[in-house]
Amino acid sequence: MLNFSGCGLLFSFCLYQSLYEDMAQEENNSFTGASSAAISLIGSIAAALMKLGAPYVVAWCKYFSPQRVVFVGGIIYGIASVLASFGKELCHFQLTQGLLIGIIPAFLLCHLWQYHQLGLESTAV
């Protein structure tokens, strides 16, 4: 379930990307005039951080309990979602949805790895 929910955050970005590209054609919004490449950078940052952040999160799991690490991940997700709702420019979404929300699956996968002793390759998609 953790793997499904963690990766689901990232793989559902295609829905946001479609909406953001439609919004880029309209006037007076956060994505006006944004290219498809600039919008897809949000999902690319998130996918990269899921894989690159996992070793760091696993190290944190060794020092702290996995429950605390997953709890902190949930707090970061809540803060990132609220901050994304106030985004006024494309870079705000790249920071919140790309950077902050992108690290969340690493937090969730750490919990799965800690209890089942699975390798990073099998848990990180």
Image (spheres, helix red, strand yellow):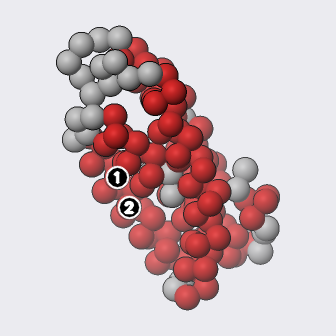
| Label 2 Cα neighbours within 10 Å, binned few <14 / some 14-19 / many ≥20 | some
Q: Position of residue 74 (x, y in %)?
A: 42, 62
| Location of the N terminus (image quadrant) | bottom right
Mark 1 sits on what residue?
A: 80
Which corner quadrant of the image does residue 106 belong to? bottom right
Label 2's element? helix
Residue at image position (34%, 18%) is: 33
Horizontal placement of 104 versus 32: left or right? Answer: right
Residue at image position (46%, 30%) is: 38
Task: Give how far apart the Cα atoms at labels 2 and 1 are.
Answer: 6 Å
Residue 62 sits above or below residue 122 on the image = below
Mark 2 sits on what residue?
A: 76
- Amino acid type assigned to the residue bearing label 2 in the image: Ile
Q: Position of residue 121 (x, y in %)?
A: 79, 59
Q: Nearer the viewer, residue 114 or 101?
A: 101
- Amino acid type assigned to the residue bearing label 1 in the image: Ala
